[in-house]
Image (cartoon, rainbow, N blue to C red):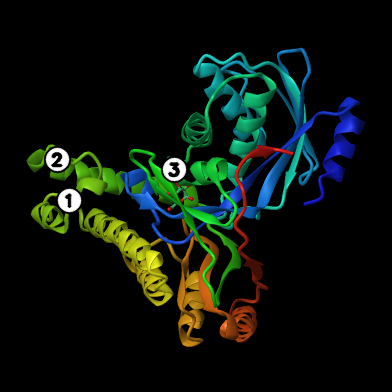
Amino acid sequence: MNTTTISEKFKELYGGQGTMYTSPGRINLIGEHTDYNGGFVLPGAIDKAMYCEIKPNGTNEVHAYALDLKEASTFGLGENDIPREQWAKYIYGVCREMIKRGADVKGFDCVFAGDVPLGAGMSSSAALESCFGFALNDQFNLGFDRFELAKIGQATEHNYVGVMCGIMDQFASCFGKEGSLIRLDCRSLEYEYVPFSPEGYRLVLINTMVAHELASSAYNKRRLSCEAVAAAMRKRHPEVELLRDATMDMLHEVANEVSAEDYIRAEFVIEEIQRLLDACEALSKGDYETVGKKMYETHIGLSRKYEVSCPELDYLNDMARQCGVTGSRVMGGGFGGCTINLVKNELYDEFLEKATTGYEKEFGIKPKVYDVVIKDGARKL
Ligand code: GLA
């Protein structure tokens, strides 16, 4: 993205110049809804990001301008100063979470913009949190490491946005590395970079352009289902802290103690944690056909068991299967957004042509296509 317009607006609004920071959105190859269950994920930061120019202003007030929305917000840094604008809550939340951790955050002026599509499952909100987290940490010399910055972003979602998300998105945005996916253990936060440039294949996202209005409450409900099942198992198996610790046998044991809905959600999660491990094993052997098969299995699970898909996503997934695409599935939280597709080079053009024209005919919406480019995480520009 060209950041000149951000700098011009900064100069116009506040005079002078600030410092520019950026933090990216993410993809996730496999391992969905496993993060808040203490499982594994396999995300990577992408070439779509949030950018902010920022400068301390010597007061206790924040002046923020969202260039894409052409909207300004001014707010203080106290616990009762929560701004009205939804987008400003992310910036305010990051400040508050830092202050709660003892940091001396002061007022600042800022302008931000980005090219991470909103509601597309590419984590625009985590990109925004990480961008401001990284920027404030640097500007006020706060000394938080990247682990803490990721947790600050996640706590912002929990406490100021109301989404009880896991750590995957913020972690990917903070720790991304060009050309590599991150195999992250969401419980211990141990991670490993997995170089990813599958020869003969391309990774492409297709955006349905639909976003479910109740996505965040439906998301929180999924999390509660998982916690309820883990709690039921804990009565017999005190070592079960999260579904990460669960086995299918343990699930069968509690079948009569949990609701049918909670049961099937937990079944998906236990399977998905294993699927990720299998996919990683296949990846290490360069066996992309198996990785692709696992992606399809994830889609079926997310659609039928976890119920976070929608007709538009299922349509794109069916198209991929019909065209012989190696792997395809809904990516991210679900309820709209993108499918991620692992496509052989020779099938790429034909698949995209068929999927996009077919989709437009079926739903009357033009889907957007993004080639995945895996890039670095949060940084100063
Ligand atoms: C959203 C959340 C993540 C994760 C995914 C599903 O992106 O923010 O923490 O739970 O959904 O894998």
Q: Residue at x 22, y 39 (%)?
A: 241
- Which comes before the other along the chain, label 1 or label 3? 3
Q: Given the image, on which type of amino acid does mark 2 rest?
A: Arg
Distance, label 1 to label 2, CA atoms, is 13 Å
Residue 112 rendering spot, x and y as whole percentages: 75, 39
Please state if 230 lies on the left or on the right of 337 as rendered: left
Which of 80 and 370 lies nearest the eye of the viewer?
A: 370
Q: Secondary structure at mark 3?
A: loop
Q: Residue at x 66, y 69 (%)?
A: 368
The residue wearing badge 2 is 234
Give the numbered dot on residue 165.
3
Q: Residue at x 52, y 70 (%)?
A: 198
Q: Given the image, on which type of amino acid does mark 3 rest?
A: Cys
Residue 140 rendering spot, x and y as whole percentages: 66, 19
Give the numbered dot on residue 258.
1
Residue 148 rendering spot, x and y as whole percentages: 49, 29
